[in-house]
């Protein structure tokens, strides 16, 4: 969901790189949705005219870094993907993606990363993560923005913002097997832990489309309110809650009961709400401020409020968790070149790594976890109570 740069299309050489327009962080708490979208599109135009694709990697060397210790950063302005060794905090490879790099998702089982091109693009680039090279490009809809991969690695789901669709990719065959129509300007996308549902945040519709992955069709649409823009979406580890970053004059994280397909609550996020990440135990939801802000807000799901926050120098855009949720990786966005490491137990910034220009998204390649119990049949942490129950729930 992090795309605000023009990516894809033919290269446009520029003799000088124009600076990215500065943003006043004091405006973040009360940005209006339409104004935010206009700012995003303006930034996309600037990045398109300044981006100079990096040269392809000299050799497709095998990457010996253990998969569980790797992360991948989509650098929108540079149009590259950085491979990070999370132990050494170094870039081991940089792969050029001429069609654009605004979001990235990874399949450990298939040794693949999927990179969306964003504005001006119609393709998803598939990377071989073992050999650090481009494997193929897959044509999808217009302006592919968000991407998510199922836990078993068999399917990837791509939001096509200008087409109002989601492309379903068969990862083994490397082709689109179905196209699903959703709301207007879909951006963020997430797959439930059991792989049965896909949740799509529709920015201009102010809604979330729920896709049944068995039939590849929309089975529910959850409205988030008139005039609301939906940016990113993330799902709780047990699959019973979906969190959506939204704005309608002020920023919120809307909480959806996935069984009933209804909105339970909306948590105000004064620092701004863009990208989301959920802790493995479901106790915390991390929210990046985005749009030039430098804050990450942390929602306590037992209390249903923002319990704390921390500053990320340089900007807070894309988020990912690693090492069982003990570490967080934050990309710093347009006009910067850093991925920042945060200790989530202390909220302390531990360091940073220089990557490509305009890092907007980060994905961690971690060990697959057992699929959570189906909603309503196993342990569940209830929103705002923290009470854990076992067994079937009354309908």
Image (cartoon, rainbow, N blue to C red):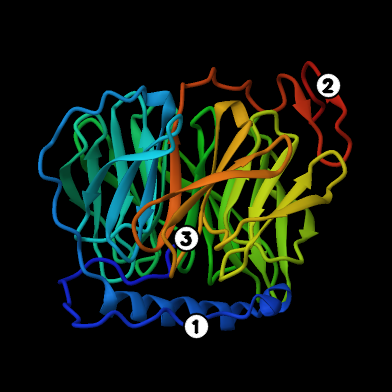
Is label 2 in contact with label 1 (beta carbons under 8 Å)? no
Determine the CA span between mark 3 and mark 1. Answer: 14 Å
Question: Label 3 belongs to which residue?
Answer: 2
Residue 389 marker: 2
Are the two marked residues, 3 and 1, in contact with CB atoms closer than 8 angstroms?
no
The label nearer to you, 2 versus 1, is 1
Please tell me whether mark 1 sits on a helix, a strand or a loop.
helix
Q: CA distance from mark 3 to mark 2?
A: 36 Å
Q: Is residue 101 above or below residue 389?
A: below
Horizontal side of 307 relative to 332 (left or right) equals: right
Could you say which quadrant of the image residue 26 lies in? bottom right
Looking at the image, tell me whether mark 3 or mark 2 is earlier in sequence order. Answer: 3
Residue that label 1 marks: 38
Which of label 3 and label 2 is nearer to you? 3
Of the pair 223 and 360, the residue shown nearer to us: 360
* Secondary element type, mark 2: strand
Separation of disc 2 and disc 1 at Cα? 45 Å
Residue closer to the observer: 199 or 251 = 251
Q: Work out whether 44 lies above or below 99.
A: below
Horizontal and vertical percent position of residue 75:
35, 57
């Amino acid at each position: 969901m992090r795309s605000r740069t023009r990516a894809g299309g033919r290269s446009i050489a520029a003799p000088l790189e124009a600076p990215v327009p500065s943003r006043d962080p004091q405006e973040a708490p009360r940005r209006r949705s339409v104004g935010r979208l206009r700012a995003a599109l303006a930034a996309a135009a600037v990045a398109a005219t300044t981006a100079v694709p990096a040269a392809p990697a000299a050799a497709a060397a095998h990457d010996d870094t253990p998969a569980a210790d790797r992360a991948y950063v989509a650098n929108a302005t540079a149009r590259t993907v950085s491979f990070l060794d999370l132990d050494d905090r170094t870039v081991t490879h940089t792969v050029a993606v001429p069609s654009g790099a605004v979001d990235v998702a990874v399949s450990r089982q298939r040794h693949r990363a999927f990179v969306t091109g964003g504005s001006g693009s119609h393709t998803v680039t598939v990377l071989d993560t073992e050999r650090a090279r481009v494997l193929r490009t897959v044509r999808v809809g217009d302006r592919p923005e968000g991407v998510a991969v199922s836990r078993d690695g068999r399917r990837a789901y791509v939001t096509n913002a200008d087409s109002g669709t989601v492309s379903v990719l068969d990862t083994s065959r490397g082709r689109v097997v179905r196209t699903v129509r959703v709301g207007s300007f879909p951006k963020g996308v997430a797959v439930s832990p059991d792989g049965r549902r896909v949740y799509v945040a529709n920015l201009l519709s102010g809604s979330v489309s729920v896709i049944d992955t068995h039939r590849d069709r929309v089975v529910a649409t959850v409205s988030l309110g008139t005039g609301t823009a939906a940016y990113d979406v993330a799902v709780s580890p047990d699959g019973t809650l979906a969190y959506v970053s939204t704005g309608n004059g002020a920023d919120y994280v809307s909480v959806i009961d996935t069984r009933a397909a209804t909105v339970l609550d909306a948590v105000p996020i004064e620092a701004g709400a863009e990208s989301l990440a959920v802790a493995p135990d479901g106790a915390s939801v991390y929210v990046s401020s985005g749009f030039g802000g430098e804050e990450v807000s942390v929602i306590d799901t037992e209390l249903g409020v923002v319990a704390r926050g921390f500053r990320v120098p340089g900007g807070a855009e894309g988020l990912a968790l690693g090492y069982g949720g003990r570490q967080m990786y934050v990309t710093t966005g347009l006009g910067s070149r850093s991925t920042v490491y945060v200790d989530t137990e202390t909220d302390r910034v531990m360091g940073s790594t220089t990557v490509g220009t305009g890092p907007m998204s980060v994905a961690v390649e971690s060990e697959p976890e057992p699929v959570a119990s189906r909603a309503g049949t196993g342990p569940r942490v209830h929103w705002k109570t923290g009470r854990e129950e076992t067994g079937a729930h009354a309908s």
